[in-house]
Image (tube, rainbow, N blue to C red):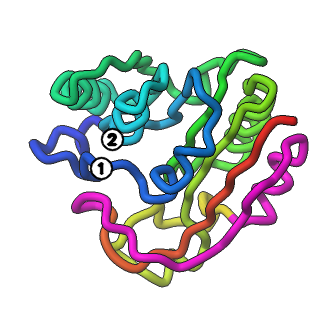
């Protein structure tokens, strides 16, 4: 499915970083970053340009090829790993930062990935997430999965990341302008948390 979507000549989610990530970049811990479901690489490349050591994981080989191309055009390098998050192992105490932008997963996998992410951070490391809330289903055609089971809420994320210091857990509506597939008024949840 994702290989087909990413096969378009355009970068379907654009080449600029996610707005929430861009706003919070200065609060990340210097060092390594794991970008979950990084697709065509816009967020990983943004962080690499700022000096972070970036590893991007995604299920789509086509998306990751575009990510490597974007990195090369930007004069930076990123490490890419093609893997399903069902199978990808997030090692404990390994990453200074973990980024999850519009990575919507079924509940059992979401809990598994979020638990592993919290454990995967180094001391003082940060976890940053933006995703869609269930209100997004009232905004058809803008983006996001079409089923309520894959949506997220601030309370859900607070529960998932209860072992971390929650700095921000906010549900809001904002204009998302990130390529042709994410464009328009959107209902989002934003989480920023730090490992104590």
Indicate whether residue 103 is drawn in magenta: no
Tally the marks.
2
Mark found first going from the N terminus, 1 or 2: 1
Residue at 56% of width from left, 51% of height from top? 24
Report the side of 118 relative to 179 (left or right): right
Q: Nearer the viewer, residue 142 or 52?
A: 52
Query: Percent x, y for residue 43?
Result: 40, 41
Q: In the image, residue 166 lies at what x, y percent?
A: 81, 53
Against 31, residue 115 (above or below) is below
Q: Residue 125: x percent and y percent?
A: 72, 32
Residue tagged by mark 1?
16
Residue 185 is left or right of residue 164, and the answer is: left
Q: Quadrant of residue 143?
A: bottom left
Instruction: Give the structural element (helix, strand or loop) at label 1.
Output: loop
Placement of 168 over or under 115, stated as above or below = below
Tell me whether circle 1 and circle 2 mark residues in contact (CB < 8 Å): yes
Quadrant hosting residue 59: top left
Is the residue 149 above or below the residue 58 in the image? Answer: below
Estimate the spatial distance between the alpha carbons at disc 1 and disc 2, rounded to whole Å.
6 Å
Residue extent of the magenta highlight: 153-181
Pointer 2 residue: 42
Q: Is residue 167 magenta?
A: yes
Q: Residue at x 81, y 48 (%)?
A: 160
């Amino acid at each position: 499915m994702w290989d087909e979507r990413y096969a378009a000549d355009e970068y379907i989610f654009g080449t600029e970083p996610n707005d929430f990530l861009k706003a919070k970049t200065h609060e990340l811990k210097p060092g390594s970053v794991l970008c979950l479901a990084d697709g065509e690489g816009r967020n990983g490349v943004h962080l690499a340009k700022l000096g972070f050591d970036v590893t991007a994981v995604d299920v789509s080989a086509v998306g990751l090829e575009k990510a490597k191309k974007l990195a090369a055009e930007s004069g930076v390098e990123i490490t890419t790993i093609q893997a399903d998050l069902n199978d990808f192992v997030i090692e404990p105490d390994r990453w200074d930062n973990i980024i999850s932008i519009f990575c919507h997963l079924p509940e059992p996998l979401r809990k598994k990935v979020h638990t592993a992410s919290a454990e995967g951070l180094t001391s003082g490391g940060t976890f940053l997430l933006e995703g869609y809330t269930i209100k997004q289903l009232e905004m058809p055609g803008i983006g996001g999965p079409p089923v309520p089971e894959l949506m997220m809420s601030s309370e859900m994320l607070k529960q998932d990341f209860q072992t971390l210091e929650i700095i921000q857990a906010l549900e809001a509506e904002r204009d998302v302008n990130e390529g042709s597939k994410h464009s328009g008024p959107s209902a989002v949840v934003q989480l920023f948390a730090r490992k104590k």
